[in-house]
Image (tube, rainbow, N blue to C red):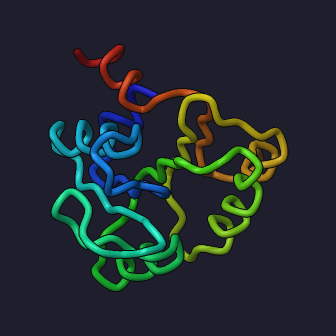
Amino acid sequence: MREILKESKVIAVLGLSPEESKPSHKVAKFLQNQGYEILPIYPKGGDILEVKAFASLKEAFEAQDKAGVRIDILNVFRKSEMLPEIMREVLELQNPPLCVWVQLGLQNAQARKMLENTKIMYIENLCIKLEYERLFV
């Protein structure tokens, strides 16, 4: 975890809420303040944390591919039962992230197994903000 957090520059946040009181917003703002480039993925689009939000995972990754930017971490704030479908989408990406990080309280054995034999690191049921603070603050 230390290495992926240290080496990463771009974090896409799936389920990033525009509401400042939501955990996804607080975590993404914290990461942005640590110097990471945050890419919001929110179905309604708009701007979140002064960045254009992408409507879907596929749209975000395709746009970054065209721009020549690699998304290092996909941070997921979606319900546990949605994780297998999200992992299917991740596996279909031309340039998948180095790591899929599923937030604290979320886990799914099927989703974990789907990424088991790939080069994509899978972390679940841990808060990326808390782990960053534990490792670097």
Which residue is depicted at the point 23% across and 55% down?
Answer: 37
Q: Nearer the viewer, residue 113 or 102?
A: 102
Left or right placement of residue 88 versus residue 3 in this view: right
Asked where in the image residue 34 lies, by quadrant, the reply is top left
User: What quarter of the picture does the C terminus occupy?
Assistant: top left
**Residue 23 location, quadrant:** top left
Question: What percent of the width, then of the height, locates residue 99?
Answer: 52, 47
Q: Is residue 133 left or right of residue 55?
A: left
* Nearer to me, 40 or 2: 40
Q: Residue at x 24, y 69 (%)?
A: 47
Q: Please say if 124 is above or below 60.
A: above
Between 37 and 15, the residue placed more toward the observer is: 15
Left or right: 27 as drawn, with respect to 92: left
Task: Kindly identify the residue that appears in the image at 77 percent across and 40 percent down.
Answer: 108
What percent of the width, then of the height, locates residue 55? 45, 76
Taking 104 as reference, is 34 left or right?
left
Residue located at (27% from left, 50% from top): 9
Residue 34's place in the image compared with 96, above or below, is above
Circle count = 0
Q: Position of residue 56 (x, y in %)?
A: 50, 74
Q: Position of residue 22 (x, y in %)?
A: 38, 42
